[in-house]
Image (cartoon, helix red, strand yellow):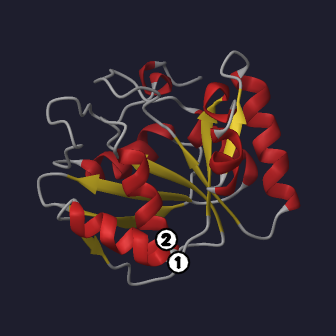
Amino acid sequence: MLRLIARLWFKLWRFELVERATPVPDRCVMIAAPHTSNWDFPLTLAIAKLGGVRIAWLGKAELFRGPLGPIMRRLGGISVRRDDAGSMVRDLVAEFATREKFCLVVPVEGTRSKSEYWKSGFYRIAHDADVPILCAFVDSVTRTGGFGPTLVPTGNVRTDMDQIRAFYAGKEGLRPGRTGVPRLREEDRPDPA
């Protein structure tokens, strides 16, 4: 039933799913970008459902209060407090150690507005948990969405982000002009000597 709803949702938006040649890894950190609108979330849920991928996603605690809470948890939501990011990274790395299957969607941009930097939590979680990063996307230019390449973080942030930038180059979110260049603050720091 949910698969049918996902298919109808994609049709309503006039989007096409880009099929992935290889299966999505059982354990990974998934980037869902560009994130420029609240509508990205239901499209990402539809991509996951159509792709046969059960995802877990991070959301602000306010989404899980009241009657929507059980629905959000059923959809794979994990409530987070954004005031202690370091603890959140440690907790999610520990969660990876306990699960055989865990595809965690991390909101890398941290906002629906254009931002200069992505949040680095996705990278630190993947690196510390020793799991790959999966690039997922919604592109309003081509009216497509799906799962792109997978990369294993090497610890060389600039090199890894160059690969991520190359994949997302030219992709626009649902609200054109709000898509920023994928970049982490860590890339601007000098390399330790």
Give how far across and how far down residue 96 sits, in percent.
Answer: 78, 55
Give the residue at x 43% y 47%: 41
Q: Residue furthest left?
A: 141
Q: Quadrant of the C terminus?
A: top right
Residues 165 and 136: in front is: 136
Q: Residues within 10 Å of mark 2 (few under 14, many from 20)?
A: some
Circle 2: residue type: Lys
Position of 165 compared to 174: left or right?
right
The residue most toward the bottom is 21
Quarter assignment of residue 38:
top left
Residue 49, numbered circle: 2
Disc 1 marks a residue whose amino acid type is: Gly
Which numbered tag is attached to residue 52? 1
The quarter of the displayed image where residue 100 is located: bottom right
Q: Secondary structure at mark 1?
A: loop
Q: Residue at x 29, y 66 (%)?
A: 10
Q: CA distance from mark 1 to mark 2?
A: 5 Å
Question: Is 7 placed left or right of 110 in the picture?
Answer: left
Q: Which x, y percent locates residue 147?
A: 40, 66
Give me the disc on residue 84: none
Q: Is residue 19 visible?
A: yes
Q: Work out whether 26 lies above or below 23.
A: above
119 vs 38, left or right, is: right
Tell me: 180 left or right of 117: left
Which residue is most to the right?
98
Residue depicted at 40% across the width and 69% down the height: 6
**Above/below status of 130 relative to 3:** above
Residue farthest to the front, as pictured: 67
Q: Residues within 10 Å of mark 1 (few under 14, many from 20)?
A: few
What kind of element bears circle 2? helix
Image spot of residue 132 (x, y percent): 59, 60
